[in-house]
Image (spheres, grey):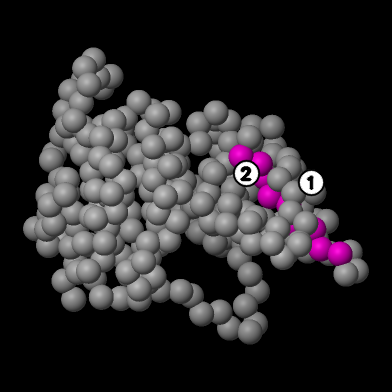
């Protein structure tokens, strides 16, 4: 099956698509992005993802001149070329092309859109969970919760964790607070008889304000399962029964 990408509103076969060599996202990681899911061609939480994209753009002073309707059209157009029930869509917005490291004039933003069929893992009944390696994040900033393409620290740390027999990394702040996994938010569950409590690190700690995270909190609240957003330290881990 052929794959396609959309660059600045124009659709191209994946094998023919080309990014400008001087694109700042490629040269400097000077870009923001969002990843959202689609089921049977229907975009999931599109408005929330666009809201977060624009918040990331404001933090890093990157122009996003296109309306939500234009972006939605691109996504639905791309999905029509990829007949699969579930997709992951990645929208990348680069500040522009060329210029000095610190731009001195406004730049024309570039947008890139990719669609990838999603496959869900199937776990056996004896699945024993995942092993996470804790590590202090060297570049953690509580006031920067934008989604950017600067994933080198996460990738290299995850590779090291894999070599040591772990499945992923679990980030800690410089103060020793639990934050999030390599590419996901985390929740911790404890049971006391029939009582269940779920805790997750707060956004104020510098974790990504995940769309799925917010949806999980919403569903737990609807089910009347207590969920608390609070500081969690590594010393607390033994008191929890589960994590997800």
Kindly report the secondary structure that dominates the magenta region of the rendered protein: strand
Residue 67 in which image quadrant:
top left
Q: CA distance from mark 1 to mark 2?
A: 14 Å
Is residue 46 left or right of 27 when viewed as pictured? right
Q: Is residue 155 visible?
A: no
Residue ID at (42%, 50%): 47
Disc 2 marks which residue?
179
In the rendered structure, find residue 56 and report the number of the disc placed on it.
none
Q: Residue furthest top?
A: 104
Disc 1 marks which residue?
235
Residue 58 in which image quadrant:
top left
Of residue 130 and residue 122, the one placed in the foreground of this image is 122
Residue 85 in which image quadrant:
bottom left
Q: Nearer the viewer, mark 1 or mark 2?
A: 2
Query: Is residue 73 rendered magenta in the image?
Result: no
The magenta stretch is 195-203
Q: Is residue 197 visible?
A: yes
Q: Which quadrant of the figure contains the C terminus?
A: bottom right
Residue 60 location in percent, x, y? 38, 28
Callout 1 secondary element: helix
Residue ID at (62%, 78%): 127
Marks 1 and 2, the one that precedes in the sequence: 2
Residue 149 location in percent, x, y? 36, 42
Residue ID at (46%, 74%): 120
Sort mark 1 into few (<14), some (14-19) or many (20+) by Cα contacts within 10 Å. Answer: few
């Amino acid at each position: 099956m052929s794959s396609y990408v959309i660059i600045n509103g124009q659709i191209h076969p994946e094998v023919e698509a080309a990014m400008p060599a001087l694109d700042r996202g490629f040269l400097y990681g000077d870009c923001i992005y969002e990843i959202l899911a689609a089921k049977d061609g229907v975009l999931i939480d599109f408005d929330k993802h666009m809201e977060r994209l624009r918040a990331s753009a404001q933090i890093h002073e990157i122009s996003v001149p296109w309306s939500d309707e234009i972006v939605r059209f691109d996504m639905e157009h791309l999905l029509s070329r990829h007949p699969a029930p579930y997709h992951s869509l990645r929208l990348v917005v680069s500040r522009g092309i060329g210029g000095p490291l610190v731009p001195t004039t406004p730049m024309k933003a570039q947008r890139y859109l990719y669609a990838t069929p999603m496959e869900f893992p199937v776990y056996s009944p004896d699945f024993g969970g995942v092993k996470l390696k804790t590590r202090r994040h060297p570049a953690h900033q509580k006031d920067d919760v934008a989604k950017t393409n600067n994933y080198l620290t996460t990738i290299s740390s995850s590779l090291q964790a894999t070599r040591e027999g772990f499945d992923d990394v679990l980030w800690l702040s410089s103060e020793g607070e639990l934050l999030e996994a390599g590419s996901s938010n985390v929740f911790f569950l404890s049971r006391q008889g029939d009582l269940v409590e779920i805790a997750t690190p707060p956004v104020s700690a510098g974790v990504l304000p995940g769309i799925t995270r917010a949806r999980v909190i919403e569903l737990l609240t609807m089910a009347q399962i207590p969920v608390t957003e609070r500081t969690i330290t590594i010393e607390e881990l033994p008191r929890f029964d589960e994590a997800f």
